[in-house]
Image: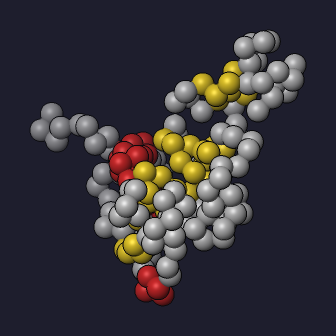
Amino acid sequence: MNCPHCGAPMSLVPERDYFFCLYCGSFHFPTPSPEGVRILSEEPLKVHCPVCNENLFRASIQRFPAVYCQKCRGVGMAQFVFGQAVLYLRARASGPSDPPRRLDPSELERHVHCPSCGQWMLTHPYAGPGNIVIDTCGTCGLVWLDHGEFRQVIDAPGGDRGRPWYLDEEA
């Protein structure tokens, strides 16, 4: 990305989701999508979306690294990162939760390849909150979420929502 002020290349500040220009000292904060996804690269990656086959972009959700499809708005994350993001974002959630929704069994019938390693992904119900179907790669550990599914997990009802997971209940 080039600096909008001086045109010099900007550097992504590691784990901070913003860019800094070493030449003029400017900052650039990418605007997040409604789901909180920030695209962190202008150039697409050389991996393709498992749903629509478009090139994916390096991205983040609240500083958690991800890949993102600008066409279908799907999100991919490493399984461990996804688990940590869910814990963190559900603990920080505020406002009312969404009402529970039924799982659509037809969503279990699709078959997609992992954008990272190319192996078939497992399509299955997510065992956590949100009642969604996710795709996981048993080979490289990538989790793929279709548009809106990450938000469904964060906004699903549950006792962990809006309550930091690190608090001891006896305290």
Q: Quadrant of the N terminus?
A: top right
**Residue 7 occupies quadrant:** top right
Q: Nearer the viewer, residue 114 or 72?
A: 114
Residue 8 position (above or below residue 118):
above
* Number of marks: 0
Residue 16 position (above or below residue 47):
above
**Residue 139 occupies quadrant:** bottom left
Is 14 left, or right, of 131 in this rendering? right
Q: Nearer the viewer, residue 97 or 124?
A: 124
Q: Position of residue 166 (x, y in %)?
A: 25, 37
Can the viewer see residue 171?
Answer: yes
Q: Residue at x 78, y 12 (%)?
A: 23
Q: Position of residue 56 (x, y in %)?
A: 65, 55
**Residue 48 occupies quadrant:** bottom right
Residue 136 position (above or below residue 90):
below
Q: Residue at x 16, y 41 (%)?
A: 169
Can the viewer see residue 34?
Answer: no
Q: Position of residue 103 (x, y in %)?
A: 42, 80
Q: Quadrant of the C terminus?
A: top left
Q: Residue at x 60, y 25 (%)?
A: 13
Is 45 left, or right, of 120 in this rendering? right
Q: Residue at x 82, y 21 (%)?
A: 8
Q: Nearer the viewer, residue 138 or 84?
A: 138
Colouring mode (rainbow / by chain / secondary structure / one colour): secondary structure
Q: Position of residue 66 (x, y in %)?
A: 53, 48
Q: Outermost residue, right direction?
A: 6
Q: Outermost residue, left direction?
A: 170
Residue 110 position (above or below residue 94):
below
